[in-house]
Image (tube, rainbow, N blue to C red):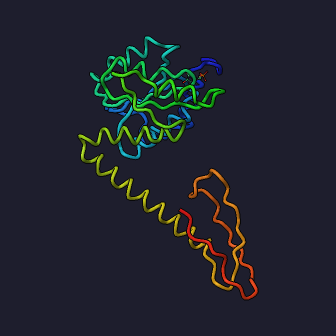
Amino acid sequence: MTARDPSQRLLRIFYEHINFEKGALMSKPVVGILMGSDSDLPVMQEAAAMLQEFGIEYEMTIASAHRTPKKVLEYSTTAEKRGIKVIIAGAGWAAHLAGVIASHTTLPVIGVPIDSSPLKGIDALIATVQMPGGVPVATMSLGKTGAKNAGIFAAQIIAASDVKIANRLKVYRVEMERDVEEKAKRLVTIITAPAHLEVEAVPVEAGAPAAKKKPRRRRWKKKPGGAAPAQGPAA
Ligand code: RP5
């Protein structure tokens, strides 16, 4: 193998993004994650991460509706017999992967449109979501969030017949609610000033998840005799 060998490139990316200790290679996968290219892996590993969180076994491979149509056909027509219960398919550009898979199997197919094109994924979104009647694809939102939701949605499908996974999903929701409430409490502390003080607003960096942000600095400034500025807690 040379350094430019595509399989080498894939392995490198795979090792960078997948935590093998948590078991990316599993003995009895029930979810199949497919993607059109190794360049989709940084997005699609979000789906794998959620499945790992819920303790669901999965397998992952690259198969392209356009570049490897025979592999897609083979995968789609044998998945059910091999014990796969849900297929997650992510692709960018003219993203036909999820739809083609759905045309070859009655397993539920979850599509993740990937924002890898100059059209920023609008092409992939439309190609994935606009399935003709009779062959549905459950289309998620674009990019990493869509891949994350695909993992959760696959867990929800599995949970319909697996009470252990159903309970893990309930715990996940409770934890998510608690996290949001904690962030809301932090926000109230930051924006509610004592009557004799005035808060100097420090802008929040856009986009970064709150948990990873540096704690916001509070700068308190004496306000001569005035009340705190009228600000309520943000939603
Ligand atoms: C699609 O083409 C893939 O899903 C990928 O998002 C896009 C670009 O692929 P590469 O040219 O990066 O291999 O089939």
Q: What residue is rendered at 63% in x and 78% in y?
A: 193
| Residue 195 image offset from top left, x and y in percent | 64, 84
Q: Is residue 81 left or right of residue 95?
A: left
Instruction: Write the residue at 43% across / 43% down.
Output: 50
Q: Quadrant of residue 139?
A: top left
Question: Ligand 1 lies in which image quarter?
Answer: top right
Task: Say which quadrant the N terminus sits in.
Answer: top right
Residue 87 located left or right of residue 142: left
- Residue placed farthest to the bottom in the image? 225
**Rendered residue at 63%/65% (across/down):** 215
Location of residue 106 with respect to 196 vertically, above or below? above
Is 200 displayed left or right of 97 in the figure?
right
User: Disc count in the image?
Assistant: 0
**Front one among 79 and 104:** 104
Q: Is residue 202 above or below residue 156?
A: below
Relative to 10, say whether 169 is above or below.
below
